[in-house]
Image (cartoon, rainbow, N blue to C red):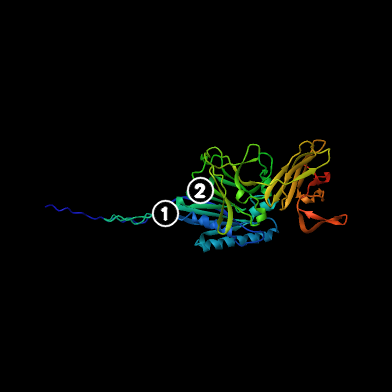
Amino acid sequence: MMRQIFILLTIVISPIILFGQTKTIKTSAYFKSDKFELRTDGKQTIDMALDTLPQTDIFKIIVTGNTDNSADSVYNLKLSDKRTEAVKNYLITKGVNGNIIKTNYFGEEKPITSNDNDDGKQKNRRVDIVIFYKQKTIPTQIEVDSVPKQVNVIDTCKRDTVIILPEGTQIVFNRCEYLEIKECLEFTETNNPNAILANGISLMDTSGYPIASCGMLRVTMKPGCTDRECFKFPIKVRFPIPKDKECDYCGRNARVWDLSSNGGWVQGQGKKNEVKIINEVKIIKVQGQLFYQFEILCPNYWKNCDCEMPKGKKIKFKTKRKYKIVSVVVTSNCPTTAIEFKPKRRKNIAKKRIPCLIGEKYVLATIVDKNGDTLTLEQMPLNDLTKKTIFSGCKKIKGENVGYRFGIFPIGKRSFYRKYIIKPSDLKSKQ
């Protein structure tokens, strides 16, 4: 009888490290005014950047500190140095070798936007972080054995990457898709009145009635960077819910709105390949913070977490008859809104019914004089305008008055008045 002889071979492959092309991840941590302590959102941004690179070789990190221009240049240079060190020290606590961290600091010398307003200053109070890495492949020891071995592989494409923007907006991507397209992405966050004005957006529905915003965002794909029209996986957008409940007008009535062709907002209808758009807005809690959350399938369109505001009192703006009002805009930060007034029958009067807003309110206007020259009312506190202070429909501010009496009765201060007068002395020629 012939014997069958089985020969067991064991093959050992020595580990070899193969390095690919150098790649980078760029992100930023933001700071409070005149502070160098790393905020919670900054730590989360760094954690997420490092978390996306578990199978890579990080060989260099450049950390660059910056400030706004609120103090003198020497002070700002020292402050940016301290911010740089705060980020470097945090990276070291996360296991990064301190020898590969290179630091620079420039104070106020390299702003990324204007320092003329609070929003711009916030974006300039930053530390930029650039992580240089190479993908590595490390073949493990392979044994051809008579007993097969089960290998557990972690599918990183089932994980998420969270991007945190300066105003606190969070954008949740599928990790693999984000790494594919991250260089093509741009984000425009519009969560406050100044950002609304800077982007030329009003907060009116298509019928011209004001709405309140939980937050607005545009995710843009850079032209020519990719031919992808929609995301493979819907991205989640999260807007922080105000801690002051009086400023949270929307609550569970929040919905997704789209910007229509006439500049007004309409409840989500979907764009292009969005066969089925999810208009539902959920309220979720992440690390103790409440957020409004909804999903976006396709980029390049404004999305707004909004709700209709209750009908309020009629507010009137008036100027001299020889002037023509083109537009008056009133903004509020509680709730976040920008309300536009336009004249109808009489060109020197613009009026509209709006709620009694309780936040800081500012007004700006565009007016044409009898010669056809354009004049502007630059952004100023609304109640600094000349106003009619009696018979207002809004509630009094407790314990305060406007400084004079109506007969024997003190005139109480109010957050909003029924009639405002725009005087020629309030206007400036448009440059």
- Residue 335 spot, x, y in % from top left: 68, 51
Residue type at mark 2? Answer: Tyr
**Residue 103 seen anywhere in this rendered image of the structure:** no
Label 2 sits on a secondary structure element that is helix
Question: In the image, 414: left or right of 253?
Answer: right
- In percent of width and height, residue 385 lies at 80, 49
Whether residue 213 appears in this view of the structure is yes
Give me the residue at 63% from left, 38% from top.
260
Choose between 179 and 169: the one closer to the eye: 169
- Where residue 369 sits, quadrant-wise, is top right
Q: Is residue 208 above or below residue 135?
A: above
For the residue labelled by badge 1, is the local secondary structure a helix, a strand or a loop?
Answer: loop
Q: Which residue is mark 2?
A: 178
Closer to the chain start, of discs 2 and 1, is 1
Q: Is residue 375 shown above or below 389?
A: above
Q: Which mark is residue 154?
A: 1
| Residues at circles 2 and 1 in contact by the CB criterion of under 8 Å | no
* 17 on left or right of 303: left
Q: Residues within 10 Å of mark 2 (few under 14, many from 20)?
A: many
Q: Which quadrant of the figure contains the C terminus?
A: top right
Residue 406's disc number: none
Front position in the image: 127 or 22: 127
* Spot occupied by residue 97 in the image (x, y as percentages of width and height): 50, 62
Viewer-closest of 287 and 49: 287
Query: Which dot, 2 or 1, sits closer to the camera?
Result: 1
Farthest right residue in view? 407
Asked whether, in this view, residue 376 is left or right of residue 266, the answer is right
Q: CA distance from mark 2 to mark 1?
A: 18 Å
Which kind of residue does numbered mark 1 sit on? Ile
Does residue 60 lie above or below 189 as drawn? below
Residue 224's image quarter? top right
